[in-house]
Image (tube, rainbow, N blue to C red):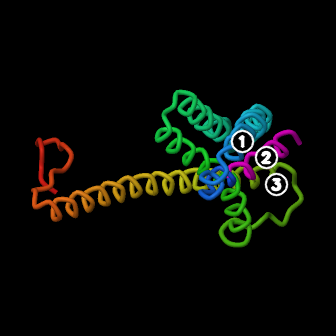
Amino acid sequence: MTHILCGTVAIVTCCLQVWPALRHKHPKAHRISGRLYVAAGVLPGSLAGLAVAYASPSGLSMQMSTATTAVVGLRMIRQGRIADHRRWMVRSFALTMSIVLSRVLGVLYDHTILPPPLTQDIPTLIAWGQQRAGLASWPGWILPLLIAEWWLIEREASARHRARQARRKQAAQTGATPQGPPSAGGWRGS
């Protein structure tokens, strides 16, 4: 019950954390929901999840990855490393939402590739449940994380593109040749 309650707090506050309008217009609410996310959601939910993980086919790695990313994100903001904090919290959001995705995948599997057994034999039901959870856990964990990493890479590429465009515009107005950031081969024009 503790794991479910704290997990619910983590999911709700995690959604608040990635809401841009809340972050920009109400930074105090962002800080409070962030503290709740870590202190009342992810950390106690992960600790309670250790007992669940012991008996779960998805295991300890799923619980610890979510807690670890949240702790790293908290550490980054405490050090004033805002850009790093945002990157780690995007990953933490992805891993928190992976729990939801794995449940959705489990239901999808029930109706497609892995229907429940027709028997009431306990060992058969346990084996089916473990197979279902295992099949749902890994894609449920990896897909959101891959999407988050893709989003972070695309966002950084977009920021670099906007910076190049701004330099070109400024150079066109002043008649100078724009210079880009240093690359592996030295300075290059944009």
Residue reaching furthest to the bottom: 112
Quarter of the image with the N terminus is: top right
Residue tagged 2: 9
Amino acid at dot 3: Leu
Q: Amino acid at mark 1?
A: Tyr
| Label at residue 125 | 3
Q: What range is drawn magenta here?
A: 1-14
Cβ atoms at labels 2 and 1 below 8 Å apart: yes
Circle 2: is it few (<14), some (14-19), or many (20+) Cα within 10 Å?
many
10 Å neighbourhood of mark 3: few (<14), some, or many (≥20)?
Answer: some
Q: Secondary structure at mark 3?
A: helix
Q: Nearer the viewer, residue 146 or 52?
A: 146
Left or right of 133: which side holds 18?
A: left
Secondary structure of the residue carrying tag 1 is helix
Q: Amino acid at mark 2?
A: Val
Q: Are marks 2 and 3 in contact (CB under 8 Å)?
A: no
Quick check: 74 left or right of 45? left
Q: Position of residue 133 (x, y in %)?
A: 70, 52
Q: Mark 1: give few (<14), some (14-19) or many (20+) Cα within 10 Å.
A: many
- Indicate which label's residue lies in the foreground, 2 or 3: 2
Numbered badge on residue 37:
1
> Is residue 190 rendered to the left or right of residue 2?
left
Q: Is residue 13 magenta?
A: yes
